[in-house]
Image: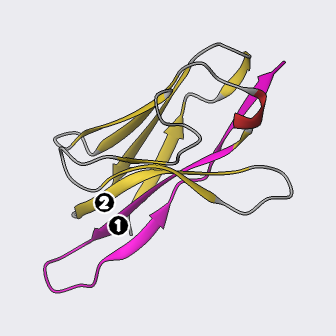
């Protein structure tokens, strides 16, 4: 089982910045894709940013130019730098990873517990 622990959420005024971090841990595992989703009250969970490889990034149109995703494969971490935050960025942000615990096991999807980001106007 791979555990994902997030940190860095909080309350910020519109136009401000926050940085989210997520660390993956297990006794033995290999990670493929990592990234972030978010879920606002009354809405479905939506993709924010993914980083399937060391040089490939994908962003939701709503965050392009404002958010930056990065990975440290040596530390099994993924971060999300969020700038120019807006009230509609308010949501619970979830880190995810696709990983396997051995070469003979299947790739599985893992989620963090979520961290609240609130942007006040």
Q: Describe residue 40's horizontal placement relative to residue 110 as left or right.
A: right
Please name the residue shown 31% across and 46% down the image.
Answer: 57
| Label drawn at residue 98 | 1
The span shown in magenta is 92-121
Relative to 14, residue 73 above or below: below
> In x, y percent, where is residue 8?
56, 28
Task: Determine the secondary structure under disc 2.
Answer: strand
Please name the residue shown 16% across and 41% down the image.
Answer: 74
| Label drawn at residue 48 | none
Q: In which quadrant will I find the N terminus? A: bottom left
Please name the residue shown 63% across and 30% down the image.
Answer: 9
Q: In which quadrant will I find the C terminus? A: top right
> In x, y percent, where is residue 39?
70, 53
C-alpha span from label 1 to label 2: 5 Å
Q: Describe residue 24's horizontal placement relative to residue 5 as left or right.
A: left
Magenta segment includes 2: no
Number of marks in the image? 2
> In x, y percent, where is residue 95?
49, 50
Mark 2 Cα-neighbour bin, 10 Å: few <14, some 14–19, many ≥20: some
Whether residue 113 is visible, yes or no, is yes
**Callouts 1 and 2 close, C-beta under 8 Å:** yes
Please name the residue shown 30% across and 67% down the image.
Answer: 99
Q: Describe residue 113's horizontal placement relative to residue 22 as left or right.
A: right
Residue carrying label 2 = 33
Magenta segment includes 106: yes
């Amino acid at each position: 089982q791979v555990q994902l622990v997030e940190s860095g959420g909080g309350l910020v005024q519109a136009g401000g910045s926050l940085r989210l971090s997520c660390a993956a841990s297990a006794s033995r595992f290999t990670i493929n894709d990592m990234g972030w989703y978010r879920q606002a009250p009354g809405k479905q969970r939506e993709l924010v940013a993914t980083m399937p490889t060391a040089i490939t990034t994908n962003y939701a149109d709503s965050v392009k130019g404002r958010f930056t995703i990065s990975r440290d494969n040596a530390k099994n971490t993924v971060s999300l730098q969020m700038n120019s935050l807006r009230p509609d960025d308010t949501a619970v942000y979830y880190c995810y990873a696709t990983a396997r615990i051995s070469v003979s096991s299947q790739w599985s999807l893992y989620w963090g517990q979520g961290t609240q980001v609130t942007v006040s106007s």
